[in-house]
Amino acid sequence: MAFPEKIGRYTIKAELGRGGMATVYHAFDPSFDREVAIKLLPREMMHDPQFRVRFEREIKMVAALEHPFIVPVYDVGDVDGQPYFVMRYMAGGSLSNLIEQGKVSIEDTARIIERIAQGLAYSHKKGIIHRDLKPDNILFDENDNPFISDFGIAKLKEAGGGLTGSGVIGTPAYMSPEQAQGSGDIDSRTDVYGLGVIIYQMLSGQQPYSADTPMGVVVKHITEPVPEILKLLPELPPEADAIIKTAMAKDREKRYPNTIELAKAMNKLAFGKEGDLTFGTDPSLKSRSEKITAQSPRVKTGVLIAGGVLLLSVLGVFLLRNQLFAPDPLSASDPPPSEAPAWTAASSPTATEQPAISFAPFCAEDVAFSVPQAQATNMVCTAKRPYTSVAITEGSTFEVLHPDGTCRIEATSRGNHVLSCTGPDFLVMELKVCNPPALSNDDLSQCSADATFNSENQCCVPVPPEDAGCIVIEVRLRGCN
């Protein structure tokens, strides 16, 4: 379908989407030399004399929202009586695109929700309720950071008489019961409900209610219990079901009181802690892409220096131990090492003899240092980027043996660290996981200089090679583009 070459001063490059409420274009703003998105509303809305007043008032309120997790509105205008507003262009697509690629992990769901929840909490403090939360209205920038868009659109629909479904304002699949019933007493908890629906869909890949007609979906939101997500995904922790049921409670008094409390519950589920969430305008949380990027050269250099210091410290301990416990030089009358052990327990040393040092016995040949468990689990695409989860034994160290791959600890649960590994599409990388023996000062004195104490078996083993207690597994990433 043909689209206009220009809207106002903006040069139209492509059509991004079209719906009953508006058409969205990708455009270029020559005044500021930047890419933008333009939402052009139907001309028929302007037939209502009250709509222009309502449109200008609502869009100015939305444009005044200045928050790092809300898509900013740059400009407002009309062309030949057709209203439009100009927003930041989001190159990363929508949450709908992400869900179409498959179920979203608990960790990524929590990261997205924590940002969206903070943007909503800020707007609620300003007296603005979104009322049309859905995956289409959560957009990603080029760095995969999520933002909320389309504030006030539901209210503009109401003002212009644009109804979705059978006389219902908003999107039926994500409406709170009070909104579905047309209640005029809507507060911020209707957005809590919408987030609960989105969480259900992200984790399961489908909406909680379905019916043959939009109105049938509306009725189910009002009358039917919240579906148990564990029936679809029994592998999810029970807390996930409890979070969704609380967010989507029919009685809003039983929901989370605000979006921040919902986000804290998701963080607690995903990462074991609530996180530093804020109602303010300058949150310090890092974005999803920042958390899963490779270390900078400066960080890597610091790690190498710290590793060198640690290695020198360990060598120093061994050298000091050798100085403290070194045997006397053998005399001419001493038996050669092949005939007798260098060290024996002394029974009753004479006054002229140096007392021998008694060490722990040597271990049997089949005794070795334990190695950690490591297993790659699910492979997913998140905002067109591949991720593979890996479970390793808690306390283990890990190293990615490929320059293009990165892994980081996302959560610790049931004695395991859960790693999130990423890199280019179809990358196959090796992950080295180690369970290095922990030695105390007392352990170091249990064995001679050429051996190391095995505390599990209370015996001495030869000094292990560098890779003792380590395993290497293969981690594969799927293609997402």
Image (cartoon, grey):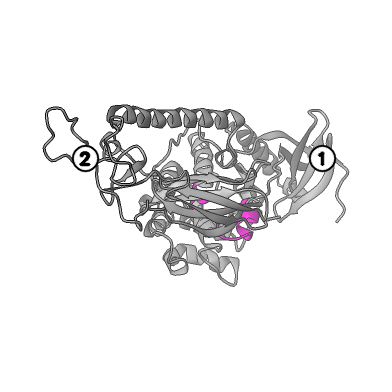
Quadrant that contains the C terminus: bottom right
**Dot 2: element:** loop
**Dot 1: element:** strand
Tell me where the magenta segment starts and ends, as one range: 95-110
Judged left or right of residue 439, residue 372 is: right
Q: How far apart are marks 2 and 1 (CA)?
A: 94 Å
2 or 1: tag closer to the N-terminus: 1
Q: Which of 49 and 259 is in front in this view?
A: 259
Instruction: Specify the quadrant of the image occupied by residue 442.
Output: top left
Q: Mark 1 points at which residue?
A: 79
Magenta residue check for 96? yes
Q: Farthest residue in the front direction?
A: 333
Measuring 59% from the left and 57% from the top, which residue is drawn there?
Answer: 380
Q: Nearer the viewer, residue 327 or 222?
A: 327
Q: Is residue 180 above or below residue 315?
A: below
For the residue marked with disc 1, what is the amino acid? Val
Is residue 186 visible in the rendered image? The answer is no
Pinpoint residue 394: horizontal percent, then vertical percent. Answer: 39, 49
Pinpoint residue 389: horizontal percent, then vertical percent. Answer: 52, 54
Measuring 41% from the left and 53% from the top, which residue is drawn there?
Answer: 371
For the residue marked with disc 2, what is the amino acid? Ser
Query: Badge 1: few (under 14), some or many (20 or more) residues near its Cα, within 10 Å?
Result: few
Eye-nearest disc, 2 or 1: 2
Q: Which of 162 and 23 is in front in this view?
A: 23
Query: Badge 2: few (under 14), some or many (20 or more) residues near its Cα, within 10 Å?
Result: some
Judged left or right of residue 424, residue 387 is: left
Judged left or right of residue 91, residue 117 is: left
Pinpoint residue 324: horizontal percent, then vertical percent. Answer: 28, 27
Q: Name the residue under label 2.
A: 358
Is residue 124 visible in the rendered image? The answer is yes
Quadrant that contains the N terminus: bottom right
Measuring 46% from the left and 27% from the top, which residue is drawn there?
Answer: 309
